[in-house]
Image (spheres, grey):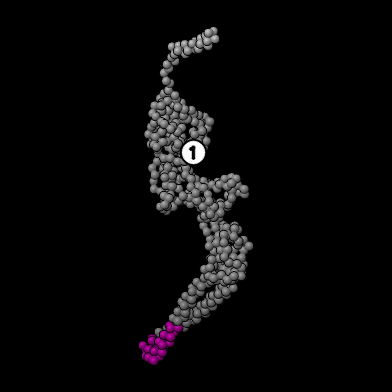
Amino acid sequence: MKKKLLILLPLAIGLAAIAAAPLLKTKPAQEEPKERAQKVRAFKATPLAVVPRAVGYGTVKPARTWDAVAEVAGQVVWKAPALKGGQAVAAGTPMLRIEDADYRLALARIEAGLSSSEVKDKTTRASLAIARKDLKLLRDDLDRKKTLAAKGAASRTAVDAAERQLLNAETQVQNLENALLLNAAERQALAAEKAQAELNLNRTAIAAPFPVRITEVKIGEAQYANKGQLLFIADGLDVAEIEAQFPIGILRPLIAAASGSGEVPAVAVTGLEAKVRLRAATHMAEWSARIDRAAGSIDPETQSLGVVVAIDDPAGQAMPGKRPPLLRNTFVEVELIAPEMADQLAVPLSAIHAGKIYVVGTDSRLEIRDVDVAFSQRGFAVLRGGIGAGEMIVTSDLPSAVPGMLLEAQEDRKSKRRMVEAATGKAPSPEKDR
């Protein structure tokens, strides 16, 4: 019995404790639910001096090319050592000579003809002077005989004979004067032939008309060159041109900024600054360029406009190891830079969501506003309205944006720095970065 009591008594106590436990349990204290703030990145919108930019790409071409064509026929008797592909030569450098013996002989024949004509002209003038004196004497003799015939002292036959002699003398004078006119005409023709012969003789020697780089040679020494045959090709070194393609939409804010009125005039790209860059594996070379012209039409497939920029004296600007010479077909980047537009409100492109922007409003509550975008470029957009200076712009991507939701804003200096650099072209100062 004692053993049974030792087992049953603890068991009864345990069952009683289990039954009484719910009666002894206290309810937890009721707490009101607290609103959790959504952490977001944001920064204050401040007016900036925005500099619209556009980047395009194109290949280098010389502004001038030289196709050296033989203007006279003959054998090539000399070729300059510099007449090789890749060689750069200065303006006026002799490049090639064609055999000129035939052209010298032709010139000598013409000069001999001119000398003969001058001698003929001299003798004709002397004969004309004598004929004119003879004519005067015959005219006086005729007048005298007519006077005598009127007095009956001379016969009619004598008068007629004097008139015939006068007519013969007048004919001789007229023939000599005509001979002088013909000599003058012949000399003019010979002078024109001489000028042509001298021109052909000069054309046997070919020199560079402007600074060039030889790209292709098509004839060698001792070969015969036909008139009109292409001898060699060269590219001008004074100006290099690049036609870069830009979408019309990207050019619009640049053209408007350059016009100064905010309106987009007819296609004109004057007033913009241009930079040309060549990106290499180890460094980047840069040239200042001038905008020469815009293309005459828009590409129908890409809706892009070609803008031609020019670099003066690219060969003279070359620096070994830093800036190479700009050769034909070099692929480069062209950046167009407009005058700055002061006091513009710019925001990161990523902060605009389907035409709306998130703002940290009163009491750190989310406000969702419609914005009017003036234009956008890589990394930023300029707004006409929707926000004001000094308001906090949310740069985070909110998966579930609910107007009025509580926000905990953290300064997004990294996004602001990137946006300011893209909009102004320079990094913000530490004071403005806050």
Total of numbered circles in the picture?
1
Which residue is at the far top?
2
Instruction: Name the residue carrying label 1.
Output: 422
Note whether 44 is above or below 211 in the view shown: above
Q: Is residue 349 visible?
A: yes
The x, y position of residue 384, in whole percent, is 39, 36
Region in magenta? 146-172
Closest to the observer, 369 or 245? 369
Give the residue at x 42% y 23%: 35
Closest to the observer, 45 or 273? 45
The verdict on residue 149 being magenta is yes
Note whether 383 is above or below 109 in the view shown: above
The x, y position of residue 75, in whole percent, is 59, 71
The x, y position of residue 141, in whole percent, is 43, 85
Residue type (three-letter) at the residue carrying disc 1: Ala
| Chief secondary structure of the magenta portion | helix
